[in-house]
């Protein structure tokens, strides 16, 4: 993964030396930003239509010419989905849609569809069901291209605010999505789009849902990559996700080149999760690791202690040293606060990775540990990270960087611990297992009680105070 300005990609070496993320950054292989050009119709006279004076809104859409603009000016209550089966702009001008049924309130079945200023109200998010505000449905063979949802207000759906399936060059931006059961924005096998500038809050996870998400980019796990490709080349930026108390704020399962940038994530069990996708032949195993993903410049906080990590990067496989696909990517310049309570949780937790760079992050006000290299991290590099103000959890020792298990090879350069208001005993680096190869260079553990606790031969130190 490379970062840089439009003319000069940023090399891994430059990142190690502390190059800053600046305006105009382009993530290699990513959409350039929320203003990404999407497929539009050629110049033509635009037909317009309206719901004024009609008895059926669906009838207005069915009679509209391709690429028409249809205005919704009235409040409609629907018992069946409103279906869009041709290119058009559906613009809400004082109107709204509501339902008391568990349905896809707006179902998009065509590319080049824009939905602007939608106001959509569902039957509530305290029960499980398949109700969604907007659903866009393509296939692996015929994906939808150019679906856009802009400035929507979506509330009260038992499953998702927006569900995109097999969509390309899509955009969901500047929308408010609240009180949904499963996900604010859910993407299955989507490519080359952007989810930017949205406010997503209160994802309730009613029984029997096992999990829930603010924003999620995934693939179906019942078939292989031919039928369910990875979600890839997606920019998730400048969103505010809050109150997903039972699961994850922003997530990708097995995504490729997913850029999670400048988001604010508050009060979620796990803030940002870059994790693997299941094996289609074995639901108990993972097969597809997240590849070349970037987690950059996010702020992840929570106010109530509990299990879960702020940022998680995990590859495929279930055991130490697994030969399954490893996660790759970069975690750069994030701020994480209030995490690290559980047995292996941390502000930033990584395992089953290869060549991951974790640089210039700040993990503050957590319990027990700041950064955790759990197991099976090959050639991971930690540079310029700061852990600050750890608090003690029971009798457990707090640790700035915990090499928790085995099969880790790591270089730690110029990391530091900063003391907080309490006098909690803190260890700088802990590595109690022999099957690790950890090199420490010029780190600053002067504010810790004990700088390094390690098994003989597992840690080598250079130029450390």
Image (tube, rainbow, N blue to C red):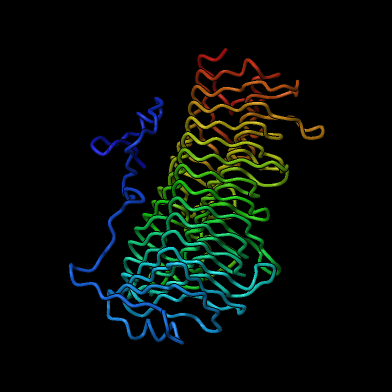
Is residue 83 placed above or below 327 in the rendered structure? below
Q: Is residue 355 left or right of residue 309?
A: left
Image quarter of residue 437:
top right
The residue closer to the viewer here, 28 or 398, is: 28
Query: Residue drawn at (69%, 66%), measured in percent from left and top?
Result: 206
Q: In this view, does 396 lie to the left or right of 120?
A: right
Image quarter of residue 402:
top right
The residue closer to the viewer here, 284 or 385, is: 385
Residue furthest to the left: 43
Instruction: Where is residue 73? Give x, y as percent.
Output: 44, 72
The residue closer to the viewer here, 152 or 57, is: 57
Query: Residue drawn at (75%, 20%), measured in percent from left and top?
Result: 423
Instruction: Where is residue 304? Give x, y as percent.
Output: 72, 43
Residue furthest to the front: 53
Count the numbered circles shown.
0
Is residue 414 placed above or below 171 in the rendered structure? above
Image quadrant holding the C terminus, namely: top right
Image quadrant holding the N terminus, namely: top left
Image quarter of residue 232:
bottom left
Instruction: Where is residue 256? Give x, y as percent.
Output: 40, 54
Query: Residue drawn at (51%, 50%), measured in percent from left and top?
Result: 274
Query: Residue drawn at (47%, 50%), measured in percent from left and top?
Result: 326
Is residue 228 placed above or below 461 in the rendered structure? below
Instruction: Where is residue 79? Give x, y as percent.
Output: 56, 84
Is residue 125 placed above or below 416 in the rendered structure? below
The residue closer to the viewer here, 120 or 342, is: 120
């Amino acid at each position: 993964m490379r970062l840089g300005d439009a003319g000069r990609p940023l090399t891994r070496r430059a990142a190690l030396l502390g190059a800053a993320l600046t305006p105009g950054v382009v993530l290699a292989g990513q959409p350039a930003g929320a203003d990404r050009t999407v497929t539009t119709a050629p110049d033509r006279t635009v037909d317009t239509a309206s719901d004024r004076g009609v008895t059926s809104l669906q009838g207005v859409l069915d009679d509209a010419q391709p690429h028409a603009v249809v205005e919704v000016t009235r409040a409609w209550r629907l018992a069946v989905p409103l279906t869009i089966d041709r290119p058009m702009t559906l613009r809400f001008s004082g109107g709204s849609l509501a339902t008391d049924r568990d349905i896809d309130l707006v179902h998009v079945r065509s590319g080049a569809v824009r939905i602007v200023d939608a106001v959509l109200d569902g039957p509530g998010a305290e029960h499980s069901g398949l109700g969604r505000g907007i659903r866009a449905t393509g296939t692996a063979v015929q994906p939808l291209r150019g679906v856009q949802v802009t400035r929507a207000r979506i509330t009260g759906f038992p499953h998702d605010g927006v569900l995109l399936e097999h969509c390309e060059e899509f955009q969901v931006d500047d929308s408010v999505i609240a009180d949904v059961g499963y996900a604010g924005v859910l993407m299955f096998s989507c490519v080359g789009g952007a989810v930017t500038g949205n406010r997503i809050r209160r994802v309730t996870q009613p029984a029997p849902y096992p999990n829930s998400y603010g924003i999620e980019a995934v693939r179906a796990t019942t078939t292989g990559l031919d039928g369910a490709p990875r979600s890839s080349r997606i920019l998730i930026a400048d969103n505010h996700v809050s109150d997903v108390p039972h699961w994850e704020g922003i997530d990708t399962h097995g995504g490729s080149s997913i850029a999670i940038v400048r988001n604010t994530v508050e009060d979620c069990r796990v803030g940002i999760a870059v994790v693997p996708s299941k094996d289609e032949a074995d639901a108990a195993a993972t097969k597809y690791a997240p590849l070349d993903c970037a987690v950059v410049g996010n702020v992840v906080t929570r106010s109530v202690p509990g299990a879960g990590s702020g940022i998680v990067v995990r590859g495929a496989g279930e055991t130490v040293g697994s030969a399954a696909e490893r996660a790759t990517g970069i975690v750069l310049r994030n701020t994480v606060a209030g995490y690290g309570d559980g047995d292996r949780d941390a502000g930033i937790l990584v395992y089953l990775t290869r060549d991951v760079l974790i640089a210039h992050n700040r993990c503050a006000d957590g319990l027990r540990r700041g950064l955790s290299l759990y197991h099976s991290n090959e050639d991971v590099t930690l540079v310029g990270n700061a852990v600050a103000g750890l608090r003690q959890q029971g009798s457990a020792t707090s640790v700035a960087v915990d090499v928790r298990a085995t099969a880790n090879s790591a270089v730690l350069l110029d990391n530091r611990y900063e003391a907080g208001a309490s006098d909690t005993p803190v260890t700088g680096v802990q590595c109690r297992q022999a099957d690790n190869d950890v090199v420490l260079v010029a780190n600053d553990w002067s504010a810790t009680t004990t700088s390094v606790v390690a098994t003989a031969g597992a840690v080598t130190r250079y130029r450390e105070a």
